Image (tube, helix red, strand yellow):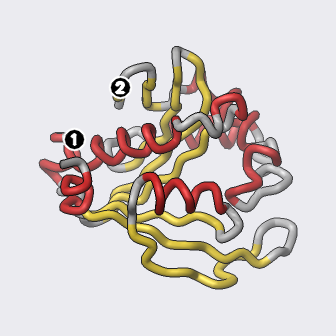
Amino acid sequence: MRIEKDNIVIRSATIDDALQLNKWWNDGRVMEYVGFPNGVGEPLEDTIKNIESRKDEYSQLCIIEIDGKAVGEINYNIKGNTAYPGWKICDANYQNKDYGPKIIMVLFEFLFTDETINSKCPVEKIAWDTLLENKRAQHVYESKLGVRKVGVKKDFWKDPTGKLRTAVDYEISREEFFDSRK
């Protein structure tokens, strides 16, 4: 998978990306807002297995590049008619520069329009969550993208430090996405 829009590229991760992904995933500063303040503690071999296991159009692990530099990651799984993505701009130098909303919209457009995916499994809805304390993400979703907050899951998960975490659920339908682009 490869998507290009202006200076942004979203492409399938390869084994060559394993070292960078592993570095990001094990960095608590990068992973703090997804509930891993000390990183995930994953060995490089497990990162390689993760990349190798996500090779079909319904489950992807991707690298975000800006101006040719790897700056973050995207993943998604498609089940039924719903896509479940996640994303992170991992390089702090590229955060708070309005890349997030652009990257998310490029991903959403791909998920709703990719012929290979939609010919076999039409994506009608995209759903994701963020931790309650990730106010920056909530601001982007609600103010910049105008997506619907559909619920809150209180104390749904205990992070590795033992802290209970609450998530805010979001979704956007195919119709809402295309109506917002008019």
- x then y, percent, for residue 56: 35, 42
Above or below, 83 against 170 in this view is above
- Residue for point 21% across, 41% down: 114
Find residue 5 and name its label. 2
Q: Residue 151's x, y, as percent?
A: 48, 80
Residue beneath label 1, please?
A: 114
Q: Nearer the viewer, mark 1 or mark 2?
A: 2
Whole-percent x, y for residue 45 in the image = 70, 37
| Viewer-nearest residue: 178 or 83 | 178
Picture quadrant where residue 147 is located: bottom left
117 and 133: which is toward the camera: 133
Estimate the spatial distance between the alpha carbons at disc 1 and disc 2, rounded to whole Å: 15 Å
Relative to residue 87, is residue 136 drawn left or right?
right
**Could you tell me the amino acid type at mark 1?**
Asp
**Where, by quadrant of the figure, is residue 159 drawn?**
bottom right
**Residue at point 69%, 83% (across, down):** 155
Q: Is residue 1 above or below residue 115?
A: above
Visible in this render: residue 103?
yes
Q: In this view, does 36 lie to the left or right of 152?
A: right
Residue 17 vs residue 124: left or right? right
Mark 2 burial class by Cα count in 10 Å: few <14, some 14-19, many 20+: few
Circle 1: is it few (<14), some (14-19), or many (20+) Cα within 10 Å? few
Looking at the rendered structure, the kind of residue marked 2 is Lys
Q: What element carries label 1?
A: loop
On screen, residue 126 versus residue 31, left or right, reads left
Estimate the x, y position of residue 75 in percent, counting from the top left: 49, 46
| Residue 95 against residue 131 in the figure, above or below | above
Identity of the residue drawn at 68% across and 58% down: 34
Q: Residue furthest left?
A: 119
Question: What is the residue that sits farthest to the top in this orientation?
Answer: 68
Q: Earlier in the sequence, mark 1 or mark 2?
A: 2
